[in-house]
Image: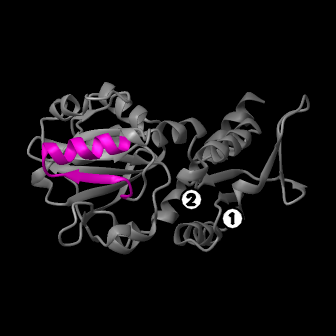
Amino acid sequence: MKIAVLSRNSHLYSTKRLYQAILEAGHEAMIVDHSICDLVIEQEGPSIIYKGEKLHGIDAIIPRIGASVTFYGTAVVRQFELMGIFSAIESQAIVRSRDKLRSLQILSKAGLGMPKTAFTNFSKGGEKQLIEHVGGAPLIIKLLEGTQGLGVVLAETKKAGQSVIEAFHGLRARIIVQEFIKEAKGADIRAFVVNGRVVGAMKRQGAEGEFRSNLHRGGKAEIIKLSRLEKQAALGAAKALGLNIAGVDLLQSSRGPLILEVNSSPGLEGIEKATGINIAGEIVQYIENAVGKKTAIRKIKE
């Protein structure tokens, strides 16, 4: 089987690990920079031109689409799907997860626990009311386009919250506001889901004086055994968004696990080093089973 990892940087830990895991499983591996793929759409059917040549012979892809190129990256994934090539993460699921507001709306409809969240249009003078919607200060203010903890602000007081919201709205930047979960104490849980199973989980603790637990912001990680409710929450979130591979971020609260975010291109370095689990190998095994099942169904129909 030939499996392509869609990645703009072949030197990234996650890209290298997936490439290695594919080879270790006895398959052919390649890395495709989706940002320089040309998509050809014609009556004869869709095709992809990469570095001057038409891509062919690929059985499956593993998308590693960065947030900054979501539109073009998901268009490339969709083109592969239309060519009948299996994608470990569906293009529409990536689109759903990348829209923070939309993903929270979907999770809310599914009845999953999450911090109370509010969103409004750029309305002058509505900052105070927005803060009240989430229970007052302290509160969290997030840019909808932020990643890896960037664009996330903790407002300790209502006055500070109003000032930050006014500043973002003045820049015409879309934001959401969320209640602050004090009992989480600057820590969260990353559960890694592959094909309906939690294959690994770690607890991330923010650096001293830092409310964000992201490893990119200096946080530390350690392996953790999830409770039944935490596992259910992680699996429910991935299922609601249609993600077969997902990094689900949870907060431990007095009312149970609360979903912060669901990542469709979760990094492997932190989770593999914290847990010692071969997550990349789990992903390749999932693809093997999925492509094998797809091939068997096609043969039966023939």
Q: Position of residue 181 (x, y in %)?
A: 15, 48
Q: Which part of the image, by quadrant, shows the C terminus?
A: top right
Numbered disc 1: secondary structure: loop
Pointer 1 residue: 27
Q: Earlier in the sequence, mark 2 or mark 1?
A: 1
| Residue neighbourhood size for the residue with mark 1, other residues' Cα within 10 Å, grouped as few (<14), some (14–19), many (≥20) | some
Q: Is residue 114 left or right of residue 24?
A: left
From the viewer's perspective, tell me whether residue 187 is left or right of residue 90: left
x 46%, y 62%: residue: 267
Q: Residue at x 39, y 40 (%)?
A: 170
- Answer few, some or many: residues within 10 Å of disc 2's Cα (few below 14, many 20 plus, some between 14 and 19): many
Q: Are marks 2 and 1 in contact (CB under 8 Å)?
A: yes
Q: Nearer the viewer, residue 122 or 113?
A: 122
Give me the residue at 45% from left, 57% from top: 266
53 part of magenta stretch? no
Q: Which residue is mark 2?
A: 284
Chosen colour scheme: one colour
Q: Nearer the viewer, residue 195 or 230?
A: 230
Residue 160 in view (yes/no): yes
Separation of residues labelled 2 and 1 (CA atoms): 10 Å
Q: Amino acid at mark 2?
A: Val
Q: Which residues are magenta?
A: 149-168
Q: Can you see residue 240?
A: no
Query: Is residue 117 or residue 1 the one in the foreground?
Result: 117
